[in-house]
Image (spheres, helix red, strand yellow):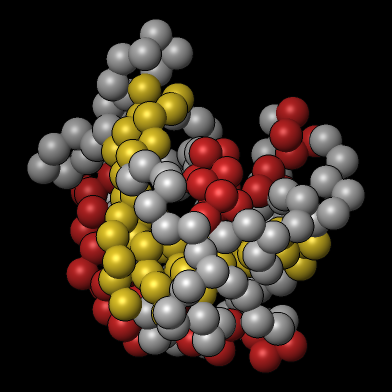
């Protein structure tokens, strides 16, 4: 179901490239090479219990399906930003290695409410108030402006699956004028100078 928020109803940015496709059948070889790849996989949960009653409004993919994506061919020298949920952290690290990236560090998104309080939500053992984005590195990266951005984003919680704009700003600071790709994006992710792939664009 398409989102009806202002961002999604607005015309796409003029210098953005949107590819509406199911990533499981997409020919990745024709996409070219990228300096930065961002992924927010639709992780498949083991069952209803871990969500504690939260409805998921998107199609999920198994770990095997995500792991089988040919991400390693998208870059010889670049960065991968991989969003993960707590229970999938070991699998996300395995994906980094399989795709040829070395774990560098992580970016933590601490969520807050409009009143600047910690935005706690569902969880299994503990309530979640953050999301984790692993950062993988491939190649030397001598041209990247490393060390200029914080590893913490503190901003308001958004609608389900909407990630903070600050991450994209950070990436464009780290790798200025780069070739940027987002996989599993939606219409609200479209951004100038970015290629965005998803089945809800």
> Is residue 185 found left or right of 9 in the rendered image?
left
Above or below: residue 62 compared with residue 40: below
The answer to whether one can see residue 131 in this image is no
> Is residue 51 found left or right of 71 in the rendered image?
left
The answer to whether one can see residue 188 in this image is yes
Q: Residue at x 66, y 65 (%)?
A: 178
Residue sitting at the far top: 115
Residue 76 coordinates in the image, percent (x, y): 53, 86
Q: Residue at x 74, y 39 (%)?
A: 8
Above or below: residue 65 compared with residue 43: below
Above or below: residue 97 compared with residue 48: below
Q: Which is more toward the observer, 168 or 123?
A: 168
Residue 140 coordinates in the image, percent (x, y): 43, 79
Q: Quadrant of the C terminus?
A: bottom right
Q: Residue at x 68, y 43 (%)?
A: 188
Q: Which is more toward the observer, 124 or 166?
A: 166
Q: Which is more toward the observer, 154 or 158?
A: 154
Q: Residue at x 58, y 82 (%)?
A: 74
> Is residue 187 found left or right of 143 in the rendered image?
right
Residue 158 coordinates in the image, percent (x, y): 50, 31
Residue 116 coordinates in the image, percent (x, y): 36, 13
Q: Quadrant of residue 46?
A: bottom left
Q: Which is more toward the observer, 173 or 188?
A: 173
Q: Quadrant of residue 126?
A: top left
Residue sitting at the far front: 142
């Amino acid at each position: 179901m398409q989102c009806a928020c202002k961002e999604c109803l607005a015309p796409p940015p003029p210098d953005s490239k949107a590819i509406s496709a199911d990533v499981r059948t997409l020919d990745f070889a024709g996409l070219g090479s990228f300096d930065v790849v961002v992924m927010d996989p639709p992780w498949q949960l083991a069952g209803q219990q871990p969500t504690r009653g939260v409805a998921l409004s998107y199609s999920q993919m198994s770990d095997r399906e995500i792991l089988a994506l040919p991400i390693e061919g998208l870059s010889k020298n670049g960065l991968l930003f991989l969003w993960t949920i707590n229970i999938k952290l070991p699998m996300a690290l395995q994906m980094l290695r399989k795709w040829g990236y070395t774990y560098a560090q992580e970016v933590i998104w601490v969520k807050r409410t409009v009143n600047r309080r910690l935005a706690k939500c569902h969880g299994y053992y503990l309530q979640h108030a953050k999301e984790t984005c692993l950062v993988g590195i491939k190649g030397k990266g001598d041209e990247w402006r490393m060390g200029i951005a914080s590893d913490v984003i503190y901003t308001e919680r958004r609608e389900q699956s909407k990630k903070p704009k600050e991450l994209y700003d950070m990436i464009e600071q780290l790798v200025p004028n780069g070739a940027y790709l987002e996989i599993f994006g939606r219409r609200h992710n479209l951004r100038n100078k970015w290629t965005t792939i998803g089945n809800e664009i």
